[in-house]
């Protein structure tokens, strides 16, 4: 491992951002499927298909960010992606707050599509900004660390958000399950805010305090 990766604040900030972000995405997918199957009695196929809008939004936004937005807007694309992700998570909370405790929440599909757009916008920008300032000899170690932390964040997200949902939902009926999924989403919202703060530390600052944009 290249110790020089930790000589600047940008790469450690990228590691923390990666852990928090992938905890959100993987943890929320787990909670959504758990609630559909355990809380609403939806079968596995319908529960899986519910995530299709997320995947479609992710695919479209990833292509758009990689092809156009990252080159033009640089690190701002990360912030926009997190903002869209946050809006989608809050929209999902609003859906759950007004949903029937036993009915399939169809408006949730729109919120999940919005979440997918946010995830897709963030990803290409994040990895570009995280790896771009590094020296060639640092790239291998950096990519390995980012991948390891990504997997760690995903595991923690599934464990923490999944456990929170199950702890609340199993002890009660449909109302408890609906309350549990909202709690999990609020925790995810907090992690998105953390990701936003740490992602700002990934951007090098010039003498004036403004972000430095490579040409």
Image (cartoon, helix red, strand yellow):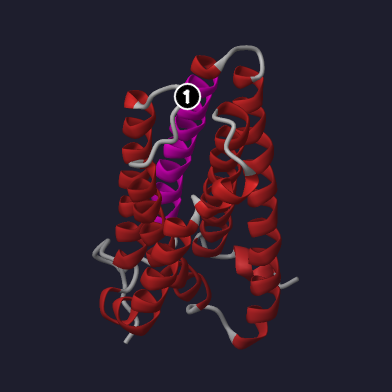
Instruction: Pick the residue in front: 205 or 108.
Output: 108
Above or below: residue 119 compared with residue 160: below
Which secondary structure dominates the residues rendered in magenta? Answer: helix
Does residue 201 appear anywhere in the picture?
A: no
In the visual, does 178 lie left or right of 115? right
* Residue 33 visible at all: yes
Q: Is residue 55 magenta?
A: no
Percent across and percent down for residue 105 are 40, 36
Q: Is residue 1 left or right of residue 94?
A: right
Instruction: Please provide the residue range marked out in magenta.
Output: 177-199
Q: Is residue 119 above or below residue 179?
A: below
Q: In which quadrant is the N terminus drawn? A: bottom right
Q: Position of residue 82 (x, y in %)?
A: 37, 53
Element marked by disc 1? loop
Q: Which residue is mark 1?
A: 102
Picture residue at 52% right of the left edge, 54% below the top: 49
Residue 186: in magenta span = yes
- Quadrant where the C terminus sits is bottom left
Q: In this view, which residue lies farthest toward the top? A: 172
């Amino acid at each position: 491992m290249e110790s020089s990766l930790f000589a600047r604040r940008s790469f450690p900030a990228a590691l923390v951002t990666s852990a928090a972000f992938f905890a959100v995405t993987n943890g929320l997918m787990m909670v959504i499927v758990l609630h559909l199957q355990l809380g609403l009695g939806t079968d596995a196929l319908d529960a899986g298909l519910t995530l299709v809008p997320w995947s479609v939004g992710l695919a479209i936004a990833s292509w758009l960010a990689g092809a156009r937005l990252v080159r033009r807007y640089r690190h701002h694309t990360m912030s926009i992606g997190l903002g869209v992700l946050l809006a989608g998570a809050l929209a999902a909370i609003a859906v759950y707050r007004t949903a029937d405790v036993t009915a399939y929440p169809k408006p949730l599909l729109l919120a999940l599509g919005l979440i997918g757009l946010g995830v897709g916008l963030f990803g290409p920008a994040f990895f570009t900004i995280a790896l771009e300032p590094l020296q060639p000899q640092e790239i291998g170690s950096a990519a390995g660390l980012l991948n390891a932390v990504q997997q760690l964040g995903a595991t923690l997200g599934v464990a923490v958000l999944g456990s929170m949902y199950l702890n609340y939902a199993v002890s009660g009926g449909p109302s408890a399950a609906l309350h549990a999924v909202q709690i999990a989403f609020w925790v995810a919202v907090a992690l998105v805010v953390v990701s936003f703060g740490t992602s700002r530390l990934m951007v090098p600052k010039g003498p004036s305090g403004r972000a430095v944009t490579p040409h």
